[in-house]
């Protein structure tokens, strides 16, 4: 008995140590994201700027406050949102390869953007600044509308579908239909507009302004708060819908809550950053493997933390510090996330144990 207690205490202590280490890593990456880029700024100078003091070079203040700080905060919000969205969908569908976009939200957002970009006019790298009054919120509005329409359609179909697996198939079919519409728009568009749309699909944390953050932040935070409230029903769903129902869980309400929360998180990130792949699949598995737990009371905060860390790492790599090259963000997230997905496929025994 004493040996078991000591082992349990040791495991709890190790998990706490890892959690503290992740928090410190997040803080370090946040500072590095403000200091590193095409222009390297000393960390102590970054600290001075954040504290409201004058740095050695006045231009550094503009670089940090107007460009790098919004990008770092966007990466933290987007990584947390996509990680939580992936966790919710993997648990709900009991599918380790599910991601936040599995219900077609990303395809709906892509259709909205395609309708604006491919039918209105050419765009600049600052997201349709050429549209005058619409400004750089044009793509965000189009993506939000597209994802909201798909979300409404999936939620309406969820009332008529009893099986989670059937709902998954419905979501995939909706995604295929919207992707087909995007393909037709691309086929009949001119090369300049196609190039603008492709640039959006690469994904980016750098195009979000302070005004957009003022909209994005409360929406993402509300979705993350909802995920915390869903921790107990998610634990019940790990043992199947019948078991969850026997424990007093309202399956219809939980289904709506899970789908709505995931759609809001994924749709918001896609609207402001473009479709960011692999983070939603990989981060929940990082957390399960690192902390050896399926308890969502622990997984939800850990996924938020690890999602932010992974997104900041991807943003740092994409910015290629020391050069003026900016790599496609989705290429970087694929390099991080693909090995995680491969690990899931190759460790099927562990995967089955985690979802049963």
Image (tube, rainbow, N blue to C red):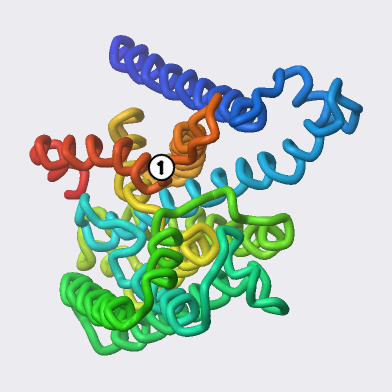
Residue 347 pos. (x, y %): 11, 35
Residue 253 pos. (x, y %): 40, 76
Give the residue at the far front of this rendering. 191
Q: Tell me the residue at 52%/83% (across/down).
A: 120
Q: Is residue 256 visible?
A: no
Q: Within 10 angstroms of label 1, few (less than 14), some, or many (20 or more) residues?
A: many
Q: Is residue 33 visible?
A: yes
Q: Tell me the residue at 36%/79% (across/down).
A: 189
Residue 67 vs residue 70, the one in the foreground: 67
Residue 72 vs residue 220, the one in the foreground: 72
Q: Is residue 220 left or right of residue 117?
A: right
Q: Quadrant of residue 137?
A: bottom right
Query: In the rendered image of this protein, does residue 75 appear above or below residue 293?
Result: below
Q: If the image is split into quadrants, where does the N terminus sit? A: top left
Q: Tell me the residue at 51%/21% (across/down).
A: 21
Q: Tell me the residue at 66%/31% (across/down).
A: 34
User: Which residue in the structure is indicated by mark 1?
Assistant: 299
Say which element carries label 1: helix
């Amino acid at each position: 008995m004493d040996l078991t207690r000591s082992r349990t205490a040791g495991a709890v202590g190790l998990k706490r140590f890892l959690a503290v280490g992740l928090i410190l890593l997040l803080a370090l990456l946040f500072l590095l994201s403000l200091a590193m880029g095409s222009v390297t700024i000393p960390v102590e100078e970054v600290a001075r700027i954040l504290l409201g003091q004058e740095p050695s070079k006045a231009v550094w203040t503009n670089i940090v406050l107007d460009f790098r700080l919004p990008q770092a905060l966007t990466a933290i919000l987007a990584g947390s949102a996509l990680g939580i969205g992936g966790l919710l969908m993997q648990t709900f569908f009991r599918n380790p390869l599910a991601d936040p976009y599995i219900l077609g939200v990303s395809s709906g957002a892509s259709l909205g953007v395609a309708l604006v970009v491919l039918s209105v006019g050419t765009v600049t790298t600052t997201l349709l600044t050429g549209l005058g009054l619409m400004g750089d919120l044009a793509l965000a509005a189009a993506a939000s509308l597209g994802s909201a329409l798909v979300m409404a359609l999936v939620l309406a179909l969820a009332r008529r579908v009893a099986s989670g697996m059937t709902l998954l198939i419905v979501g995939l079919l909706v995604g295929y239909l919207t992707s087909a519409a995007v393909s037709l728009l691309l086929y009949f568009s001119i090369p300049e507009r196609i190039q603008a749309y492709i640039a959006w699909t690469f994904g980016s944390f750098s195009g979000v302004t302070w005004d957009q953050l003022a909209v994005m932040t409360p929406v993402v935070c509300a979705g993350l708060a909802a995920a915390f409230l869903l921790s107990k029903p998610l634990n019940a769903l790990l043992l199947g819908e019948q078991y969850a129902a026997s424990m007093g869980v309202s399956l219809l309400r939980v289904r709506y809550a899970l789908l709505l929360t995931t759609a809001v998180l994924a749709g918001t990130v896609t609207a402001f950053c473009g479709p960011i792949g692999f983070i939603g699949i990989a981060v929940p598995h990082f957390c399960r493997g690192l902390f050896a737990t399926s308890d969502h009371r622990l997984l939800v905060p850990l996924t938020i933390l690890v999602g932010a860390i992974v997104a900041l790492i991807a943003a740092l790599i994409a910015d290629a510090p020391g050069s003026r090259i900016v790599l496609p963000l989705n290429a970087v997230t694929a390099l991080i996330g693909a090995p995680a997905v491969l690990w899931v496929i190759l460790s099927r025994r562990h995967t089955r144990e985690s979802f049963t």
